[in-house]
Image (cartoon, helix red, strand yellow):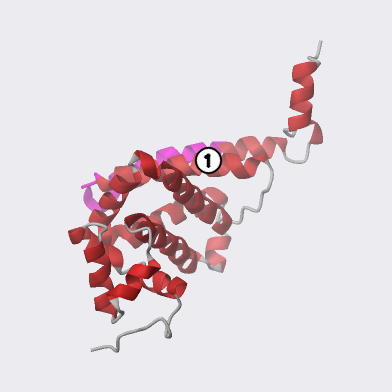
Amino acid sequence: MAETLSLEDLTLDELRVWLAPVIPIHAAFDGWTDDALARAAEQEGADPEIAALAFPGGATDMIAAWFAHVDTAMTERLESAEFDAQPVHKKIRAAVLERIAIVRPNKEAVRRALAILAMPQNAPLTAKLNWRSADAMWRLAGDTATDFNHYSKRAILTGVYASAILAWLDDESEGEAETVAFLDRRLKNVADFEKLKSKFTGDPDRRFSVSRFLGRLRYPGR
């Protein structure tokens, strides 16, 4: 049996990262509960009581840690010269599908996690996690925008990704073909956005300007 870990072996932050991909294995059966966390800790040879300290917020902390793990795993799996050579819309498509591949073994844990995140009191966290996932995908795709486009693209992808996950949860088709087809239809929004953005790139007179927009509201053109 593995030696029981203590706070002297790992910091709480390190323990949280370490246990994040293990907890959903048990959450599929026990829900995102203290029991699931304790089982995950015991599986990895950690002290359950110390593990509980790493997730003071309970279920939401566990879910947030798992989703952060998915962000990291997605990046590690996809970063390559071949990936970088793809057009943006294909990078985003690959990122969404890779995220689904990462959580696929724990589909029921995903379903239970979304049920918790759908609770009204968890709306701020849900928005934060969705935004973080979209940001991770756009950064992986090479996006470094800091202007209005930064927020628009992430808002669009947040909706695409969330709806794709819901479609996947109900998908019983062979090879998850229905999910892939659904994703391809939704990603057309992203592709269209990129095309629209490219029309304005390089032309200062056609770029969106908050000050110019407000100025025109006050002094409309004639």
The part of the image, by quadrant, that contains residue 184 is top left
Who is closer to the viewer here, 209 or 178?
Answer: 209
Tell me: 104 left or right of 202: left
- Residue 166 x/y as whole percent: 32, 43
Tell me the kind of residue under disc 1: Ala
Q: Quadrant of residue 216?
A: top right
Q: Residue at x 78, y 27 (%)?
A: 212
Q: Residue at x 35, y 46 (%)?
A: 117
Q: Name the residue that disc number 1 marks.
A: 155
Q: Position of residue 142 (x, y in %)?
A: 61, 56
Estimate the x, y position of residue 52 in percent, counting from the top left: 33, 68
Residue drawn at (56%, 55%), measured in percent from left and top? 141
Residue reaching furthest top? 222
Q: Is residue 177 magenta?
A: yes
The answer, for residue 64, to whether it is visible in the render is: yes
- On-image quarter of the C terminus: top right
Determine if the magenta segment contains residue 201. Answer: no
The N terminus, quarter of image: bottom left
Magenta stretch: helix, strand or loop mostly: helix
Magenta part of the chain: 170-192
Q: In the displayed structure, would residue 23 be above or below residue 178? A: below
Within 10 Å of disc 1 (Cα), the crowding (few <14, some 14-19, many 20+) is some
Question: What is the quadrant of residue 73 in the picture?
Answer: bottom left
In the depicted structure, whether residue 67 falls above or below residue 111: below
- Against 188, is 137 above or below? below
* Residue 172 against residue 43 in the figure, above or below: above
The answer to whether any part of residue 92 appears in the image is: no
